[in-house]
Every structure is written in C-alpha cells, then in structure tokens.
Amino acid sequence: MKILIVSDTHRKNENYIKVLEKVAPVDMVVHCGDIEGSEYLIAKSAGCPVQMVTGNNDFFSDLPREKEFQVGKYKVWLTHGHNYCVSMNNETIKKEARIRGIDIVMYGHTHKPVVDIDGDVIAVNPGSLAYPRQEGRRPSYLIMDLDKDGNAHFTINYL
C-alpha cells in the first residue's frame, strides 16, 4: 500500500498536482490541513480514497478538525497540529497520541517535514507543498509504504 501525505497547500495546488503525477498510482492521499477551499480539487484529483482535516486557515470548511482511521495494522490520528503546540516541538502531540492509543500521528502546520519514530508512536509531518520553511525551502511531501509484512516505511520527498 502506498500513501501520499501532504499538508499546507494553502490553495496553491499546482505542486500537489505535480506530486500526484510524479508518484501515481497511490492507494490513499492524506492531507493534514490548510487546504483553504480546495477540498474538492484535492479529493477529485487523487483518484483514490482521501483523508483530510481542517487547519488553522480553513475558516469555512466542513471538514473535521481531527480524524482517526486504520491503515493496515496501524491506528492513525490525523490533525493539523496547531492545537498541540507543534510549532515548539512534537512532544505534546506524541503524548496525546499515546493517551489515545495511536500508532501514527500525522500533522502539519510547521511547514517542515518530520519523520519521528519514538518507541511506540510515529509522528510524521509532510512539510508544505506551498510555503516550505525548512532549510533549502523546497516543497515537501511524504510517502508511506506498507511492505509485504504490513510494516510502515516513510520517506521525505522534495519537488
């Protein structure tokens, strides 16, 4: 199973479309928020199931603020992260994930990609396809692959 994880597209969807074309086919797309009214385009372009939540800039969206769903053997929690102090670090969000019995938490907001495997919790942030903030400032996204044994592997990718 191949999952594309993106975030913080902020209505600048050209890079999202480029990434979809580059990595296709995918079995699922996950968007960690700050979609800013592009929900239909994100979902329709994917051609597969899509999980999305609102971010701090999604003022009039009907999307949920948070979601929990299953990917293979993993319980996944999807949130934008701004309510869990992720701009400081990801310790609060990982603590909350443990309390909820979550295996993988996917979040955005910081515009910086992260894959943090911390014992029983994996915290991932794809960064931003529109306004990257990490060194080099290249638009980023994650690919989550489940191998034949159902184990998750994550790669940070750049446009």
Image (tube, rainbow, N blue to C red):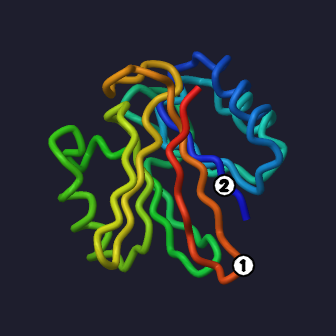
Residue 136 quadrant: top left
Which quadrant holds the N terminus? Answer: bottom right
Residue 51 point in image, percent of width and height: 62, 51
When the figure is inspected, residue 28 is found, relative to residue 69, above or below; the finding is above
Q: Are marks 2 and 1 in contact (CB under 8 Å)?
A: no
Question: In front: 99, or 73?
Answer: 73
Disc number lying in front (2 or 1): 1
Residue at 43% x, 19% y is: 131
Residue indicated by mark 1: 148
Place of residue 84 in the rendered image (x, y in percent of width and height, measured from the top left): 23, 50
Real-space Cα separation, disc 2 to disc 1, in angstroms = 15 Å
The residue indicated by pointer 2 is 3
Residue 1 in sight from this viewpoint: yes
Q: Is residue 131 above or below residue 3?
A: above
Identity, as a three-letter code, of the amino acid under mark 2: Ile
Name above or below for residue 86 compared with residue 2: above
Q: Sort mark 1 into few (<14), some (14-19) or many (20+) by Cα contacts within 10 Å.
A: few
**Does any portion of residue 52 appear in the rendered image?**
no
- As helix, strand or loop, the secondary structure at mark 2 comes to strand
Front residue of 72 and 66: 72
Who is closer to the viewer here, 54 or 24? 24
Point out residue 34 in the picture as x, y percentages from the top left corner. 47, 30
Q: Secondary structure at mark 1?
A: loop
- Horizontal side, residue 95 vs residue 153: left or right: left
- The residue depicted at 50 percent of the width and 25 percent of the height is 139
Location of residue 24 by image quarter: top right
The residue at 19%/58% (across/down) is 92
Q: Earlier in the sequence, mark 2 or mark 1?
A: 2
**The C terminus - image quarter:** top right
Callout 1 amino acid: Lys
Q: Position of residue 20 (x, y in %)?
A: 74, 35
Question: For the point 64% across and 76% down, which residue is it?
Answer: 72
